[in-house]
Image (cartoon, helix red, strand yellow):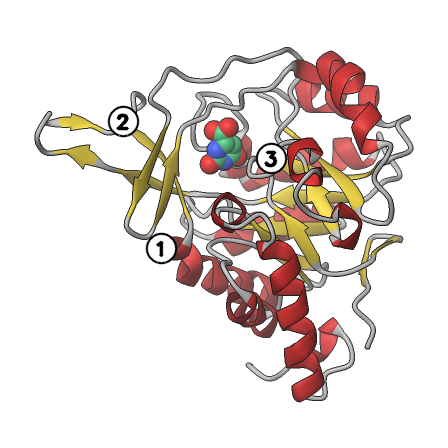
């Protein structure tokens, strides 16, 4: 069985990654699970300058998922280089993919330029889809013309794989995905969180300070599967699927919909071993169904 996944001119050892914002930069989870068995770690977003993020409360649970309005809290690109890269340098086999966020084209470019020399950084996931900050890239993610330009500029600055992370909060996600492909992206990942809101009826107030936030978890899985299905029909570059993957069955749905790789997000908060359990379940399913490689999942559903 061959679990490898080709993205651009590089190879992921297996298709299971952990989603940005749910795994930090790997350090804490490294004490709980064997990181070397993962296909990829997509880091928490890195911006040019440090960000404290939004006011608390910025996280709430619903019966079917979580709503966050973190606001891209991170220690900035210099903090990343100084404090996070030394640990990333120790990770073997699993690939480190840095999630990059910005509010202008120049900010995205600066982060990529400052990180690109780091050998243990395998590639980038360009976050054009954060729902929680004004001018936080979402303006890019909803405008195909800007998406194409940003993709092209970033591709001109690095030889490493560039994965564009798409928002579901648009009228037609396939148009944005097409713009990524035209701009030269090596892959797209979809979906980022879905705009959501929870109201405390006793306090008559929203549960989080920012009022609305990004919904993740089981509630959004059908939205993610549909997005992956529609996007992978429209473009030829690989699609990385995420949104509500809690177990191997969920991951398999994404592969059947057209995903070449997947990311586990909210499930990490419940069970740190979830991504490795999911990887085992994928292997079992492939064995039982005589599938030898991930692309064998594609083509069942037209
Ligand atoms: O739901 C999200 N929250 N998506 C992002 O891309 C960023 C994150 C945050 O920091 O707010």
Residue 5 at x, y percent in the picture:
79, 62
Among the 4 quarters of the image, the one containing residue 134: top left
Looking at this view, is 133 or 44 the one in front? Answer: 44
Identify which residue is drawn at 67% across, 15% down. Answer: 76
Split into 4 quadrants, where in the image is the N terminus? Answer: bottom right
CA distance separating discs 2 and 1: 19 Å
Answer yes or no: disc 3 within 8 Å of ligand 1. Answer: yes
Looking at this view, is 114 or 269 the one in front? Answer: 269
296 relative to 6, above or below: below
Secondary element at tag 2: loop
Point out which mark residue 127 bears.
3
Q: Earlier in the sequence, mark 3 or mark 2?
A: 3
Split into 4 quadrants, where in the image is the C terminus? Answer: bottom right
Identify which residue is drawn at 66% across, 36% down. Answer: 126
The reply to whether dot 3 and dot 2 touch (C-beta < 8 Å) is no
| Residue at the spot of label 2 | 211
């Amino acid at each position: 069985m061959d679990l490898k996944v080709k993205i651009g001119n590089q190879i992921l050892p297996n298709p299971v990654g952990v989603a940005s914002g749910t795994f930090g930069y790997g350090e804490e989870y490294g004490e709980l699970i064997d990181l070397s068995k993962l296909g990829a770690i997509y880091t928490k977003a890195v911006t040019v300058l440090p960000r404290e993020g939004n006011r608390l409360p910025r996280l709430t649970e619903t019966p079917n998922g979580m709503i966050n309005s973190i606001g891209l809290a991170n220690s900035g690109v210099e903090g990343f280089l100084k404090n996070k890269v030394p640990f990333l340098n120790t990770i073997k086999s699993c690939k480190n993919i840095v999630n990059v966020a910005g509010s202008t084209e120049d900010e995205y470019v600066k982060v990529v330029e400052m990180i690109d020399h780091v050998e243990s950084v395998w590639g980038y996931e360009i976050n054009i889809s954060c729902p929680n900050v004004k001018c936080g890239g979402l303006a890019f993610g909803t405008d195909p013309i800007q998406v194409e330009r940003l993709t092209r500029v970033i591709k001109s600055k690095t030889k490493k794989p560039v994965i564009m992370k798409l928002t579901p909060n648009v009228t037609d996600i396939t148009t944005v995905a097409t713009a990524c492909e035209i701009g030269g992206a090596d892959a797209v990942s979809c979906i980022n969180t879905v705009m959501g809101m929870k109201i405390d009826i006793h306090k008559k107030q929203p549960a989080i300070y920012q009022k609305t936030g990004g919904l993740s978890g089981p509630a959004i899985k059908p939205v993610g599967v549909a997005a992956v299905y529609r996007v992978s029909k429209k473009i030829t570059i690989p699609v990385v699927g995420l949104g509500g993957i809690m177990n191997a069955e969920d991951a398999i749905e994404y592969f059947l919909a057209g995903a070449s790789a997947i990311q586990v997000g909210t499930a990490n908060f419940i069970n740190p071993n979830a991504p490795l359990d999911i990887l085992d379940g994928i292997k079992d399913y492939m064995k039982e169904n005589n599938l030898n490689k991930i692309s064998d999942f594609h083509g069942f559903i037209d």
